Amino acid sequence: MLDALFVAAIAALLSGLLYWGFKTLPAERWQMIAAVPTAKTAEGAWRGINLTFYGFFSATGMTFGVALAILLISSVRMPLTVAVVLVAATVAVCLPASRLVAAIVERKRNTFTIAGAAFVASLVVPPAVWFGERGLRSWAQVNIFALPLLAAAAIAYAMAEAIGRLACISFGCCYGMPLRQAPRWLARLFHRYNLVLHGHTKKAAYASGLGEEPLIPVQAVTSIMFAVAGFAGLILFLAQQWRWAMIIPVIGTWGWRALAENLRADHRGHSRISAYQIMSVIGLSYLIVAAFLIPAEGAAPDLALGLAQITSTSVFVSLQAFWIVMFLYYGRSRVTGSTVSFHVNEKAI
């Protein structure tokens, strides 16, 4: 009963958030949350640093994914420290990789790529988990199970990215091609459900001149695909189908990413087949092979154990701190600026 209620609650929450985001976030006012004044100009105004909804939804998606990973890992009776170490190590790899890969592929220092970060993590995490399983059993007599760990990570990543794509809608990045340039069947398919980004500071506007123009809603479709893949993986995880609980989210995320690159209009490198498509195919193949090589062992999931862990004071406060750090890391805009001025409301004195 708890399993069904949990899945239904997550489905309702995520569906409502995505529907609201698709309808609301293309508007101009949903790009910036705040401007923080930093230095005064000669004219008496202030130069500001913009804090963005890109950072808000990136941090929210990542925190949700971390919480879900901890919940699922704890539900199969693995120690909380295992979940914390896995999450901390993955974040430590992903944060620098998100900028480094973008700098190499797109030749832009102030751009992030979650796809590039996820690719690096997908190469590093499976062997690390497998060797960690062997080492803990031999040296510390602690039993952990590699495949449930990797399945939990794949599910959490799919769910986190489903939310994270809202960040792209808000900032106007990762945008699809205009309908006028799309094949006729695609233009007809998205004639009613397209994406129009408003505001000159949206990336689609300043990078490609595509503001106020109907675009293929790649970000929204990606959110839906990732959410469905994550839900399928979650149901399989609760049914103890560890191998498929990992494989289905992997296919849904990396497989769709390889296809979706052909629908995008933003700069993705200088070759006809983008580096991200190559990464997607390599990541997909590598993770599927890993899923079949690792033994499918693990205890029956008990969501009550997982919920007890993430609602504990230490974990809850740590998740809040993690959200703040991620928001400040991803939310401080480096490609937009602002001018802020202050005045006194005479009528309120």
Image: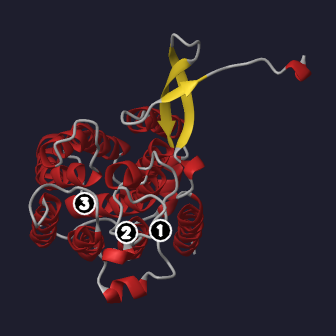
Q: Residue at x 53, y 50 (%)?
A: 308
Q: Are marks 2 and 1 in contact (CB under 8 Å)?
A: yes
- Amino acid carrying mark 1 in the image: Leu
Q: Is residue 235 above or below residue 55?
A: below
Tell me the residue that label 1 is attached to. Answer: 195
Residue ID for mark 2: 218
C-alpha gap between disc 2 and disc 1: 9 Å
CB contact under 8 Å: marks 1 and 3: no
| Marks 3 and 2 in Cβ contact (< 8 Å) | no
Residue drawn 34% across the image and 41% down it: 84
Foreground: 345 or 326?
345
Q: Is residue 2 above or below residue 44?
A: below
Mark number displayed over residue 21: none
Task: State how far apart marks 3 and 2 are (Cα).
Answer: 27 Å
Q: Residues within 10 Å of mark 3 (few under 14, many from 20)?
A: many
Amino acid found under the numbered disc labelled 3: Leu
Image location (x, y in percent) of residue 289: 9, 70
Residue displayed at 33% across by 65% down: 299
Give coordinates of residue 168: x percent, y percent: 41, 54
Q: Amino acid at mark 2?
A: Val
* Viewer-proximal residue among 254 and 64: 254
Q: Is residue 283 above or below residue 179?
A: above
Q: Residue furthest front?
A: 43
- The residue indicated by pointer 3 is 150
Asked whether residue 45 appears in the rendered view, the answer is yes
**Left or right of 348: which side holds 335?**
left
